[in-house]
Amino acid sequence: MLKHICLLSVVILFAACRDKGKNGDLLDEMAGREINEPYEPIFLQDTAVASLKKVTIKDNYYKPAIEREVVNFYKKYNYQTRWLYQNKPSPLFASYIKTLTELTDYGFFPQNYRQHELDSLVGHLYQHKDSLFLKQLETTDREITASFLLLTRHLTQGRIPKVGDDVRVWKRNKPIFDNVELLLKLKDTDNLSTVIEALQPQQTFYKAMAQKYKELLKDTTSYMPFAIADLKSFAVGYSDSTVVALRNQLGLRGYKPVALGAPAEVDSLLIEAVKQFQRQVGLTADGVPGALTMSYLQMTPTQQRDLLLLNMERLRWQNKDLGEDYILINIPEYRLNLYHKDSLKFTTKVVVGRPDTPTPIFSDSLKFVEFRPTWSVPISIVRKEMIPRIVDSGDLLKYAKRGYKLYENNKEIDPATINWRDEKTLKRNLAFVENPSANNSLGLVKFILHNDMSIYLHDTPSKKLFDNTQRTYSHGCVRVQYPDSLAYQLLKHTAEWNYQKVNDAMHKGRNQYRARPEQHFVVDISYLTAWVDEAGQLVIRNDPYQFDKEQLKLLERYKKM
């Protein structure tokens, strides 16, 4: 079935932002509530901070934060029990235990939150009341609170504390609800399952991913791993028993190349099927089933399940209300989609950062569109790339010939007067600025975002790169295949702007002309390597920045916690 996934299915992936329907209304209603008035609460006898912090938290990384939140909660709750009353547990406790079971479909593990242990403790507490009843009730109430606060922290902030590094920047969005405030405002009559659902991503495909994850939990299919015996000889006419295995494996993935001759012999249809599969997962489509291609082709249900789990986790990191107008860019997909009220208005290919200069993963808003921009080259590129190239070529005017001007301390200087071989030159505050032109590295238009990383979208003169399947070539910014159409879509509701005016601004207008869209556009740059399309099929993409392996390892510990 994978071969039938077309652009439409890719587009559907991001076709729904955070739904402001009943779930959004619920959170809005809760935000306006007063602190819940408990029914028959018990006032804590021991309110010392040290005592309140004595809770069991299985996630050691978040333990200090959860301890502080427990203390903060009971202080704001007037030191009353929240979950347990004099004669019975609150209905909210039963709802919580039930919710923990339901969350297994979303890749959560109830044992991390001591589900069975707490349920057993509460049952025993009310069945065997003794002189220590009140003390044990207080202790157990604190343990339930700690469990709940850990769950909501995992839901809103994720289970992987550090998701990027100094090179690969990954900025998580601010949680949509404060965990302590949430617990303070919960009523005994609230359906906790509904509340927890409202805290999770509201994209339709998020629930589809959970359903596929649930199905894969039951799939025990296993494959006998194999590799092509002589990969260097793999071409039309090559014959080996592993070719039959390759045909079978492609068939399991929805590709069924009919053998033109003997099944054990490579033919043109088989090579084309391999290429189709490679394109689908975002690999270079060379038709050769190398190690990386085979690793995706032979993914087991367990591996697919774990990858889905990880990508549901990633969606929770980026969870936010995107508003009516937004742009979504999924780095492993190399595509930009623009939406209005969840309806796709425009889509185009993009080029993203190289693995050594990766595009940051973050969400922010569009600031303005700039036509005929200059390019002020980042100092890191000047020192690491441009100066060494001048030295290697011996051409002092190498960049001056290409329309660059050289500045030092805001004063233009002649590049021919610089001793480029002098090591001290690397430490000088030299700045190259490329003049506006169709050959400018930023092309004829750029799209400026609010961020402190100098990351933006832009045109490019290197159009051929869009023909490649794997498009990681930039220094971090996002190159757009059809920037004129994107500019038109962003400005068409702004007074006097139409496609002709956009085209004129790019080719005939004045330099560095800025236009601000009347609409507010959120730009969300994400990183998903697995999702479920509108047909219910699992889509797997290549991992260009090598996040999957390390993040899967970090998530694995929760299975054993």
Image (cartoon, rainbow, N blue to C red):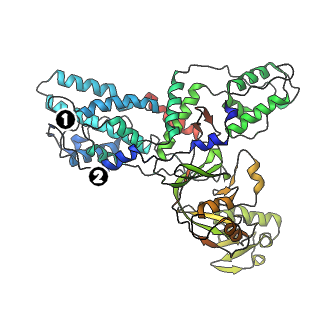
Spot occupied by residue 466 in the image (x, y as percentages of width and height)? 74, 51
Q: Specify the quadrant that holds the N terminus.
A: top right
Residue 394 visible, this angle? yes
Q: Where, by quadrant of the figure, is residue 502 drawn?
A: bottom right
- Residue nearest the observer in this picture, 398 or 481: 481
Spot occupied by residue 360 in the image (x, y as percentages of width and height)? 57, 53
Spot occupied by residue 441 in the image (x, y as percentages of width and height)? 72, 64
Using the numbered discs, state the Cα–Cα distance from disc 2 to disc 1 in whole angstroms. Answer: 29 Å
- Residue nearest the observer in this picture, 208 or 49: 208
State the residue at coordinates (68%, 62%).
484
Q: Specify the quadrant that holds the C terminus.
A: top left
Q: Where, by quadrant of the figure, is residue 8 drawn?
A: top right
- Residue flagged by tag 1: what amino acid is it? Glu
Label 1 Cα crowd, 10 Å radius (few <14 / some 14-19 / many 20+): many
Check disc 1 and report its element: helix, strand or loop.
helix
On screen, residue 261 versus residue 253, left or right, reads right
Q: Of the residues under marks 2 and 1, which one precedes in the sequence? A: 2
Q: Where, by quadrant of the figure, is residue 281 drawn?
A: top right
On screen, residue 93 versus residue 226, left or right, reads left
Which residue has dot 1 on it?
138
Which residue has dot 2 on it?
32
Spot occupied by residue 72 in the image (x, y as percentages of width and height)? 26, 48
Q: Residue furthest left?
A: 131
In front of the other: label 2 or label 1? Answer: 2
Check disc 2 and report its element: helix, strand or loop.
loop
Label 2 Cα crowd, 10 Å radius (few <14 / some 14-19 / many 20+): few
- Residue nearest the observer in this picture, 313 or 383: 313
Residue 61 visible, this angle? no
- Residue nearest the observer in this picture, 9 or 62: 9
On screen, residue 227 versus residue 44, left or right, reads right
In the image, residue 455 sits, relative to residue 221, either above or below, namely: below
Q: Which mark is residue 438?
A: none
